Image: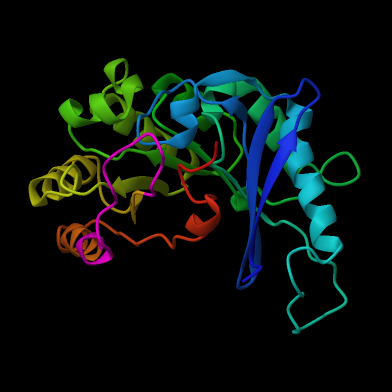
Amino acid sequence: DGATVKFLWRLFDGALVESVLMRYPGRITLCVSSQCGCGMNCPFCATGQAGLTRNMSTAEILDQVVQANRVIAEGGLGRAREEGNGAEAERVNNIVFMGMGEPLANYKRVMNAVHRMVTDAPEGLGMSARGITVSTVGLAPAIRKLADENIPVTFALSLHAPDDQLRDELIPVNSRWKVDEVLDAARAYFDRTGRRVSIEYALIKDMNVHGWRAELLAENLNARGRGWVHVNPIPLNPTPGWPTVGSPLARVRQFRDQLESLGVAATIRRNRATDIDAACGQLA
């Protein structure tokens, strides 16, 4: 419907990355890439299936935002909302580091980009830190480092399994930093910043959707207190190199309802752009 645009960017050395621009009611979100490919090797993710080419520079990360704003100004994301001050120029006001790459594996350049995003114009883009989400598959030391940056970005942890046995298979870096260590680091982020942590959980049919896994997830989160975390269940998106499909939406709702009955806040994240391979885990 024109509310989502996927970009393919060719960098100076010929490396290719993608980013996704999305219009929502009241905001425009850009899903940015931080690496050319990804070295985390998560088997259900198209980017992980491709492997890592290199880190992106701070300028390459930022230029995705600059170019997206240019496209918006040229009318490439459809018409602006006809409300309030219609003459006010629209631009990206939400950034999610959920494109290609593991942001915390390119820590210095990603944080340099975040600092430039939140710095006032003309030196920076003048964005709100609260409109920026940094995601990770669980690099525990870098999560703790992020908490000490004193920038109130939203922090998102891609968990996908509450037990080490399955998470070792889905998220290979879990063999280094186990579920408990990663959740402790996530809780420390909340303690340091006061910003509620998001837990991303892609539901894979017959794999991580069992009732006992919902119970274990709730137990793990509640053991670290109440009100510090919010779970976003979402059906796994299809990728060429992974045979298992995402759970039906009815099962996703059951999983969410079970979490809420156990005292864990949960919202099914809106999925879009699977038809142009631009949804979570599909960028390649």
**Which residue is depicted at the point 35% across and 36% down?**
44
The quadrant of the picture occupied by the N terminus is bottom right
Residue 257: name its quadrant.
bottom left
Farthest top residue in view? 176
- Where is residue 113? Give x, y as percent: 71, 33
User: In this rendering, is residue 22 above or below 107?
Assistant: below
**Which residue is depicted at the point 62% across and 36% down?**
33
20 on left or right of 162: right
Q: Is residue 44 something one can see in this rendering?
A: yes
Residue 244: name its quadrant.
top left
Colouring used for the render: rainbow
User: In this rendering, is residue 226 above or below 18?
Assistant: below
Residue 36: name its quadrant.
top right
- Where is residue 74? Give x, y as percent: 86, 62
User: In this rendering, is residue 50 above or below 128?
Assistant: above
Q: Nearer the viewer, residue 171 or 231?
A: 171
**Which residue is depicted at the point 28% across and 48% down?**
245
Residue 263 counted in the magenta span = no
157 on left or right of 245: right
- Where is residue 12? Give x, y as percent: 81, 24
Residue range in magenta is: 237-252
- Where is residue 268? Give x, y as percent: 35, 62
Q: Nearer the viewer, residue 38 or 96?
A: 38
The quadrant of the picture occupied by the C terminus is top right
Q: Nearer the viewer, residue 142 or 169?
A: 169
Q: Is residue 126 something one can see in this rendering?
A: no
Q: Main secondary structure of the magenta part?
A: loop
Farthest bottom residue in view? 83
